Amino acid sequence: MRIYREKDYDAMSRRAASIIAAQVVSKPDCVLGLATGSSPVGAYQQLVKWYERGDLSFKEVRSVNLDEYCGLAPGHDQSYRYFMQANLFDHVDIRPENTNVPDGLAADPRVECARYEELVAGLGYADLQLLGIGRNGHIGFNEPCGEFPKATHVVDLTQSTIEANARFFASAGDVPRQALTMGIGTIMRARKILIVASGADKADAVAKAFFGPITPEMPASILQLHPDVTLVADESALSHVVEAEKR
Ligand code: GLP
């Protein structure tokens, strides 16, 4: 695993954006696995700047997002489809038909999961999968549990995730209780993984995920088994890693 230790959120975002841009430049029709949350927002802003300057094009890029809340329409301002439009897709030249996010309104979420898994498999899985990390070590919406879920599935969100994500909703009661998410198996099939982490509230998860035991109770720990992982994090998110590395 390669670790980039950056001084703050902005530096982390520029570094992550340069890794994504390198992927797009070297393979213009690549499949980008994309993520939501506050961690990747700065990287998306940097990519938009490079696009506006004419330095980068997403014309041939295909994208697959990790996850979506159950029950939120694409136009709901907290849906992940809305997030992607607002933070990236509406500002670059990616073709709308080449962007994929699970459908949170599907009549049968399990059928939608099977469709989405097949779609990602049909694209040959991601060339580069961007990930954030939850405070409890979740990736996508793969919450701590007894085993690593393989394929795209419906998940009951944990109380800690509902509370962490409540900041985006009017109240914790408005946060959907379920989500559709790529499985750990789907994520692990990506050829490269880029994980971004910022802030002291991620320090514990980052240290445990990358320097602790590999266990489904810390879903991101599976990434220790992936052959091409890059962690880009700021000083505060890496503050517990210094001690972990000494052990
Ligand atoms: C959500 C998303 C994850 C994301 C996590 C952390 O639960 N499903 O993909 O990594 O939150 O979000 P943030 O970057 O806002 O801390």
Image (cartoon, rainbow, N blue to C red):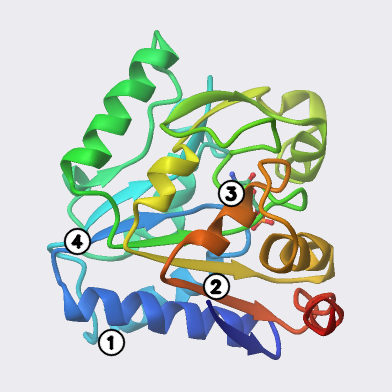
Q: Which mark is residue 139?
A: 3
Q: Which mark is residue 61?
A: 4
Point 54% across, 59% down: residue: 223
Q: Which mark is residue 53?
A: 1
Front position among marks 4 and 2:
4
Query: Mark 2 and mark 1: span between their CA atoms?
Result: 17 Å
Residue 31 lies in quadrant: bottom left
Position of residue 105 in the picture relative to residue 242 (left or right): left
Query: Mark 4 and mark 2: span between their CA atoms?
Result: 20 Å
Query: Going from the N terminus, do you reach mark 2 or mark 1 first?
Result: 2
Residue 59 lies in quadrant: bottom left
Q: Are marks 4 and 3 in contact (CB under 8 Å)?
A: no
Count of numbered circles on the image: 4
The residue carrying mark 4 has its beta carbon less than 8 Å from ligand 1? no
Residue 32 lies in quadrant: bottom left
Point 65% across, 77% down: residue: 233
Position in image of residue 227 (x %, y %) = 42, 68
The residue carrying mark 3 has its beta carbon less than 8 Å from ligand 1? yes
Kind of residue indicated by mark 4: Val
Q: Are marks 4 and 2 in contact (CB under 8 Å)?
A: no
Query: Mark 3 and mark 2: span between their CA atoms?
Result: 19 Å
Position in image of residue 166 (x %, y %) = 77, 39
Query: Mark 4 and mark 3: span between their CA atoms?
Result: 23 Å
Q: Secondary structure at mark 2?
A: helix
Point 12% across, 62% down: residue: 60
Query: Mark 1 and mark 4: span between their CA atoms?
Result: 18 Å
Tell me: residue 203, above or below residue 107: below
The C terminus: image quadrant: bottom right
Query: Going from the N terminus, do you reach mark 3 or mark 2 first?
Result: 2
Q: Nearer the viewer, residue 166 or 22?
A: 22
